[in-house]
Image: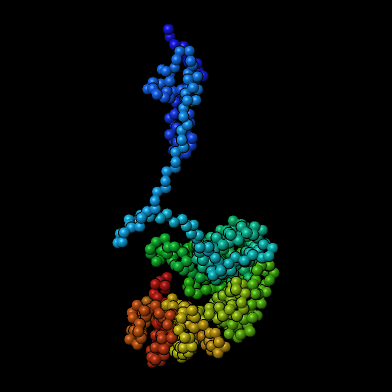
């Protein structure tokens, strides 16, 4: 007969017992009481399984129960002993060093922030308290148009832009004009708007200026634009054509344009407000101080002129040398707007006046040049190291001139300035032969400097503004006639700056 198969319950019980038997050793090692075997384990005393030794009529579950009752208790296994501590190494034994893990890479540094561009040195755009007027102050250099756009975003209600600038880059002047035209801004000039500033002025929706204010015109300088060709003549023509096109588009008549083309870049031809109204249609006059805008330490342009006219030399400049007067006036006005320091603003004006007058020192008589050299020698001998912090460039050759700071120095420099203003001047440019002769005399003087000082041929050209005391001492040691000729030569600009 066939044996009756076990029920599903019995079969499941058998599987569980077998699984328990397979993991029993693991429990024993962990000091856990061993789990009881089930029916699938071998019956003690035999080699046969419980299923084979099951008598007839007894179910597998009953066999497992009887087996469990007859199994002796399994004793608990003791925990394994802890390993002994390592013995110290013998003398002279160098234990093997473990290789340290590689260092973790340094944390990524934050991205370097770009240097924020500030407009404090070259130019600033000031805003009135109500935000309805802006004031562009300073030179027209790189990012001037960007500065104006930023100011317009911060002051969206601005309708008027006051221009106070001695000029700068032609391309930036054009860009300023395009921004002005795009926003339909009214433009106003209170003191001086010269050179590239006039390109921006002509783009104003409404153009106004005071009667004493001036516009300055001259030829384009090669340094103020990118030449389309390598040819000097093509470059010069390109710069002048840009200005001519802008002036004609702004309604400027031929009288202004022709005089602008006759004025070299190192000079400036100024036109006051009354003449501008006659020659630039669409321009109107306003009273000084009539338009509200940020003025710094000044109440108005008339206030500044009254301050200057306290010194007779400024009146003399305004009458005989308006180009020098208005250039210095613009420096004083602009610096007073930005720094709000009267003495520093006046010092800036004296520096600009001196630079403009020294550029024409080559035309002065010998006695005036000798007085100039003597004053500069005395000025520089008072400096301990003669650093170029007080060295200003006079002309293209970067001749050092001392900045008068004491009352005595200011008085001597003012007296010399009056003599220079009364001396006749000319706009005639030196010929090629004259420039070559001047360069030859400069080279001869460099030879004297190398022989009498510790300078070499490389230093002698670079240290004129760094150690001017040595140069003026050597000049003063030369005979009078030779001293005057060399100083004239030093103030003669290089030939390439006159190829026009």
Q: Nearer the viewer, residue 270 or 262?
A: 270
Q: Nearer the viewer, residue 61 or 329?
A: 61
Q: Is residue 86 visible?
A: yes
Q: Residue at x 58, y 64 (%)?
A: 201
Q: Please, which residue is most extreme toward the top here?
A: 1
Q: Is residue 288 above or below residue 151?
A: below
- In the picture, the quarter occupied by the N terminus is top left
User: Residue 26 in the image: x percent, y percent?
Assistant: 44, 35
User: Residue 155 in the image: x percent, y percent?
Assistant: 64, 59
Q: How many dots with numbers? A: 0
Q: Nearer the viewer, residue 426 or 358?
A: 358
Q: Is residue 87 above or below residue 406?
A: above
Q: Is residue 431 visible?
A: no
Q: Please, which residue is most extreme toward the left here?
A: 92
Q: Is residue 199 left or right of residue 39?
A: right
Q: Residue at x 42, y 46 (%)?
A: 81
Where, by quadrant of the figure, is residue 165 drawn? bottom right
- In the picture, the quarter occupied by the C terminus is bottom left
Q: Is residue 71 above or below residue 382?
A: above
Q: Residue at x 63, y 70 (%)?
A: 190
User: Residue 225 in the image: x percent, y percent?
Assistant: 46, 64
Q: Residue at x 42, y 54 (%)?
A: 104
User: Residue 275 in the image: x percent, y percent?
Assistant: 61, 71
Q: Nearer the viewer, residue 238 or 6?
A: 6
Q: Is residue 151 left or right of residue 497?
A: right
The colour scheme used to paint the residues is rainbow
């Amino acid at each position: 007969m066939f044996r009756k198969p076990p029920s599903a319950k019995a079969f499941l019980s058998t599987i569980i017992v077998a699984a328990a038997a397979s993991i029993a050793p693991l429990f024993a090692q962990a000091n856990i009481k061993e789990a009881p075997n089930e029916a699938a384990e071998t019956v003690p005393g035999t080699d046969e399984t419980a299923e084979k030794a099951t008598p007839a009529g007894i179910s597998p579950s009953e066999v497992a129960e009887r087996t469990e009752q007859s199994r002796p208790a399994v004793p608990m296994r003791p925990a394994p002993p802890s390993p002994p501590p390592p013995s110290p190494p013998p003398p002279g034994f160098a234990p093997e060093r473990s290789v340290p893990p590689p260092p973790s890479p340094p944390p990524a540094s934050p991205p370097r922030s770009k240097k924020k561009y500030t407009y404090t040195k070259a130019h600033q755009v000031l805003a009135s308290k109500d935000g309805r007027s802006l004031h562009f102050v300073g030179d027209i250099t790189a990012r001037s148009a960007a500065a104006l756009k930023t100011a317009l975003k911060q002051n969206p209600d601005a309708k008027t832009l006051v221009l106070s600038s001695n000029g700068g880059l032609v391309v930036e002047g054009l860009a300023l004009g395009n921004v002005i035209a795009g926003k339909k801004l009214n433009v106003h000039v209170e003191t001086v708007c010269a050179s590239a500033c006039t390109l921006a002025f002509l783009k104003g929706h409404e153009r106004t200026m005071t009667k004493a204010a001036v516009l300055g015109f001259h030829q384009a300088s090669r340094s103020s634009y990118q030449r389309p060709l390598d040819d000097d003549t093509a470059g010069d023509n390109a710069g002048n054509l840009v200005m001519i096109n802008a002036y004609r588009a702004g309604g400027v008549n031929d009288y202004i344009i022709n005089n602008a083309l006759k004025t070299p870049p190192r000079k400036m031809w100024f036109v006051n407000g009354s003449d501008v109204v006659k020659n630039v249609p669409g321009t109107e006059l306003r009273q000084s101080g009539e338009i509200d805008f940020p003025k710094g330490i000044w109440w108005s342009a008339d206030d500044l002129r009254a301050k200057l006219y306290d010194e007779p030399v400024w009146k003399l400049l305004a009458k005989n040398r308006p180009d020098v007067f208005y250039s210095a006036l613009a420096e004083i006005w602009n610096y007073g707007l930005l720094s709000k320091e009267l003495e520093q603003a006046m010092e800036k004006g004296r520096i600009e006046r001196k630079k403009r007058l020294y550029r024409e020192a080559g035309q002065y008589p010998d006695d005036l040049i000798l007085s100039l050299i003597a004053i500069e020698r005395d000025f520089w001998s008072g400096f301990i190291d003669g650093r170029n912090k007080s060295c200003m460039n006079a002309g293209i050759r970067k001749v050092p001139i001392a900045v008068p700071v004491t009352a005595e120095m200011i008085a001597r420099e003012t007296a010399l300035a009056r003599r220079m203003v009364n001396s006749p001047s000319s706009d005639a440019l030196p010929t090629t032969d004259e420039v070559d002769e001047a360069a030859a005399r400069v080279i001869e003087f460099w030879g004297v400097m190398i022989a009498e000082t510790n300078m070499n041929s490389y230093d002698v050209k670079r240290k004129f503004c760094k150690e001017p005391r040595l140069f003026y001492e050597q000049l003063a040691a030369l005979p009078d006639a030779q001293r005057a000729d060399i100083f004239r030569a030093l103030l003669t600009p290089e030939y390439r700056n006159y190829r026009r």
